[in-house]
Amino acid sequence: MVLPGICFADANASFDDAQFVICGVPFDRTASYRSGARMAPNAIRQASYNFEAYLFEHDVDLSDIPMNDLGNVDECGSPDGMVEIVREIARRIVNAGKFPVFVGGEHTITIPVVEAFDDIGVISIDAHLDYRPEYLGVKYSHACVTRRISEHVGVENVLVFGVRSISAEERSDKMPNYIDAFTIHKEGVEKAFRRAARMMEKERVFLTLDIDGIDPAFAPGTGTPEPFGLTPLEVKKCINMLGKRMVGFDITEVSPPYDEGNTAALAARMMREAIAVVWKNRR
Ligand code: MN
Ligand code: MN
């Protein structure tokens, strides 16, 4: 079910001993513009060796944190097949009381990960609303992520942060809450994200980071680049502000064929940030 591969840096614990479990989902079957996200889990793992284990600003050493890397899910054929197997793996992690960190793959992988949880809210940092009922006849598509998630957690418990692309089709429906990128640039990320966190009624929040939420100037290696995005530092601040409310994290839509390595490095650094921040808040 899970293939061994290179491990995320400092993920040296066994599954049983781990508090954080990383899993790659090399799925990009529904990519509509440019594919390649299936190569991201291993590219991000490789990039993770670029960084010090010690994050001085948090006084956290990642080599002290019990992390396990399950490797990649190998059954990533049809969308239905991917959803089924990822849901099962995510349930195993969540039911064991561990913090899941999933690495896409395209954003579709977030649907089964969120379905493994009960009674949570979801914040999606994304350039896109991803709220289409279906896309090109497919229900489990990267363009339908927040729609499928809303069906599981309730639309009032979903918030998209940093959005700057909404289709007319999505507009006509009962939409999830969102704070658009232009508003964030105007009011400042700290104020905007504090507002977002307050809008989430559920205490426990899953954070999904579609890398295209970050501006393509910083994260060019992605399937659907969209101008006017957030900076990496702004997203780092969001992760820090969410802190102990975070019950799971994923990073999606990195596309190595369009990357010179900096997008994968950024993704690896954001994973390390999320893990360090949750660990620091639990300690
Ligand atoms: Mn997305
Ligand atoms: Mn997106």
Image (spheres, rainbow, N blue to C red):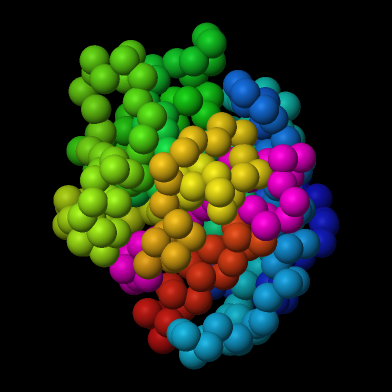
| Vertical comparison of 235 with 164: above or below | below
Image quadrant of residue 281?
bottom left
Left or right: 7, with 234 as reference point: right
Q: Residue furthest top?
A: 137
| Vertical comparison of 264 with 84: above or below | below
| Vertical comparison of 271 with 76: above or below | below
| Vertical comparison of 198 with 159: above or below | below
Left or right: 106, with 213 as reference point: right
Residue 263 rendering spot, x and y as whole percentages: 64, 53
Res 54 visible: yes
Question: Residue, x 53% and y 88% (percent of image)?
Answer: 56
Image quadrant of residue 44?
bottom right
Q: Which is more toward the observer, 219 or 44?
A: 219
Q: Which is more toward the observer, 99 or 207?
A: 207
Give the position of the C terminus as an image quadrant: bottom left
The answer to whether residue 251 is magenta is: yes
Q: Which is more toward the observer, 70 or 271?
A: 271
Give the position of the N terminus as an image quadrant: top right
Residue 216 rendering spot, x and y as whole percentages: 55, 44
Residue 66 rendering spot, x and y as whole percentages: 60, 78
Res 204 visible: no
Residue 89 rendering spot, x and y as whole percentages: 60, 48
Q: Which is more toward the observer, 212 or 14?
A: 212
Q: What is the magenta range?
A: 238-264
Question: Residue, x 77% and y 62% (percent of image)?
Answer: 46
Question: Residue, x 33% and y 14% (percent of image)?
Answer: 169
